[in-house]
């Protein structure tokens, strides 16, 4: 089952009553850089926003990108607008910042005591930029 089908809602997955998750397979991506960024107010708190990034760099440009966001909707989701903006982009901080400006597109973050939706959108952009820069080795 794909991760996109597994996560159904806040603390809700496709695992039914009487079922148990026994293993998870994650494909190996040779030649990719990866980085994870999260923002919390205190060390042991759940992340307010988190970003997981994988990029493959080829000849001074970003050839492929995968970006996952948490706490930007009721389920984890991909930042596809950023992924699309990164593919073929020059490996520069400016190009990464420009692509990362799309991080909140298609999201629906909640507002709560840790931050309102606008704050989470801002965090998504900042954390995406940091994570892509780190994953790309800049």
Image (cartoon, rainbow, N blue to C red):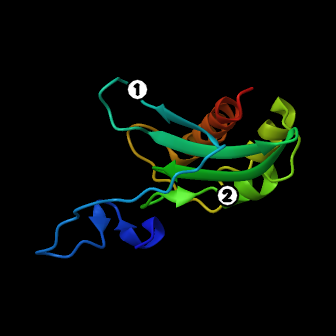
Are there few (<14), some (14-19), or many (20+) residues within 10 Å of tag 2?
A: some
Residue drawn at point x = 53 percent, y = 48 percent = 117
Above or below residue 54? Residue 78 is below
Q: Name the residue carrying label 1.
A: 41
In the rendered structure, the answer to whether residue 110 lies left or right of residue 119 reads left
Cα distance between the residues tagged 1 and 2:
24 Å
Residue 55 locus on image (x, y percent): 68, 45
For mark 2, give the secondary structure. loop
Left or right of residue 24: residue 90? right
- Residue at the outermost top position: 43
Where does the image place residue 137, in percent across and percent down from the top left?
70, 28
**Which quadrant of the structure image shows residue 41?**
top left
Q: Position of residue 31 (x, y in %)?
A: 66, 43
**Is residue 45 shown above or below 18?**
above
Q: 133 or 122, which lies in front?
A: 133
When asked about the image quadrant of residue 112, the answer is top left
Q: Quadrant of the N terminus?
A: bottom left
Disc 2 marks which residue? 105
Going by the image, does 16 lie left or right of 47? left
């Amino acid at each position: 089952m794909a991760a996109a089908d597994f996560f159904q809602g806040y603390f809700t997955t496709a695992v039914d009553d009487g079922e148990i998750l026994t293993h998870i397979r994650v494909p190996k991506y040779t030649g990719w850089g990866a980085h994870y960024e999260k923002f919390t107010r205190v060390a042991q708190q759940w992340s307010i926003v988190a970003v997981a990034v994988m990029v493959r760099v080829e000849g001074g440009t970003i050839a492929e990108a995968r970006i996952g966001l948490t706490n930007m909707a009721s389920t984890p989701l991909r930042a596809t607008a950023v992924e699309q903006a990164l593919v073929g982009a020059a490996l520069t901080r400016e190009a990464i910042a420009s692509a990362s400006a799309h991080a909140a597109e298609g999201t629906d973050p909640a507002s709560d005591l840790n931050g309102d939706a606008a704050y989470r959108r801002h965090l998504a952009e900042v954390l995406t930029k940091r994570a892509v820069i780190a994953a790309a080795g800049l």
